[in-house]
Amino acid sequence: MRKVSAAIACGLLVAAGLAGCGGDSGNDDGKITMGFAQVGAESGWRTANTKDIQEAAKAAGIELKFSDAQQKQENQIKAIRSYIAQKVDIIAFSPVVESGWDQVLKEAKDAEIPVILTDRAVDSQDTSLYETFIGSDFVLEGKKAGEWLVADAKAAPGPVNVIQLEGNTGSAPANDRKAGFAEAIKADPKIKIVASQDAEFTRAKGKEVMEALFKAHPEANVLYAHNDDMGLGAIEAIEAAGKKPGVDIKIITVDAVKDGMTALADGKINFIVECSPLLGNQLMDLAKQVLDGKEVPKRVLTEETTFTQEQAKAALPDRKY
Ligand code: GYE
């Protein structure tokens, strides 16, 4: 086990000209233990993210304690508390929702265990409660989705009526993808969101909610889903209603996991905004830097692109997740 305080003390000794802290400043057993509190296993994105984190920890020689919160904040808080009790060296987690973290983050801080936010943000005012936040710009993702629709709607003869399937209520990607999209579609008053509902980022809920919303809004001709999985579930509902996904109802999703990209290449989805789940290597690097007492940027952004149907066909053979 090692502590940041030890790393800092070591830094002071080096600054004072005293040698001998070794490469792994201040550790007692040389091994880093990371407690990772994952959101759940709700989507293809999440499965790829978990696998990537587990593989990256192994490659970096970091011992990983892993927990799955089944999309419940209380489970994640419990997991974090248990990592504190186990005196792990560092905690990383992907917060299910944005609010309600201050107390448990203070407990980690008091125990001198640094915290890295992966993938999703918290809304804590006190940013000293975590070292850094690594992940995507979800507002930008929503904007890219909306901008595609604005461009596509130029050719539309009549109203563009959108059903929106939202990710979990209160989660950073749901909040931000909704806001970015709303901002972008302001450019064309012809585009209206006729219904918008939480479908929990899962395929099953995507199908169920789309069934209900489409029944209530048969005038809908666009679906914007905050992730591929909800979009894929909705495709089943659209087909069951006797409509053609990608043609009668244009579909825009976020993530670009393999199943989503396959549906895009097959013409059932029209546009996907990429969100990369491959955060593992960067996370392990940041953890090592933090534990070595080095300054790390407060925000580390993931780079990502977008895919049309043609681009999906070209990218699919090399898609890793
Ligand atoms: O888009 C969705 C997953 O937080 C970026 O969570 C992540 C989102 C991702 O369930 O598929």
Image (tube, rainbow, N blue to C red):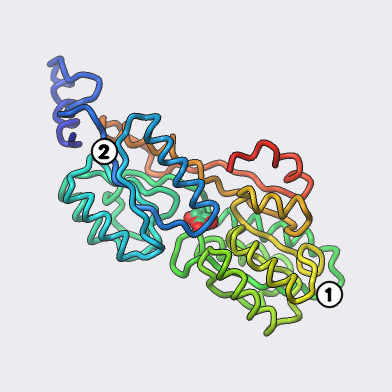
Amino acid of disc 2: Thr
Residue drawn at x 75%, y 39% is 314
Tell whether 313 sits left or right of 258.
right
Q: How far apart in space, not on screen, are marks 1 and 2 (Cα)?
A: 58 Å
Q: Which residue is mark 2?
A: 33
Nearer to me, 255 or 238: 238
Residue 15 as seen in the image, left or right of residue 50 = left
SS assignment at label 2: strand
What residue sits 73% from the left and 74% below the top? 240
Mark 1 or mark 2: which comes first in sequence?
2
Circle 1 SS class: loop
Given residues 35 and 102, the one toward you in this image is 35
Asked whether, in this view, residue 220 is left or right of residue 103, the answer is: right
For the N terminus, the quadrant is: top left
| Position in image of residue 31 (x %, y %) | 24, 30
Mark 1 lies on residue: 158
Categorize mark 1 by other alpha carbons within 10 Å: few (<14), some (14-19), many (20+): few
Q: Decide if residue 136 is on the left or right side of residue 124.
A: right
**At label 1, which amino acid type do we have?**
Gly
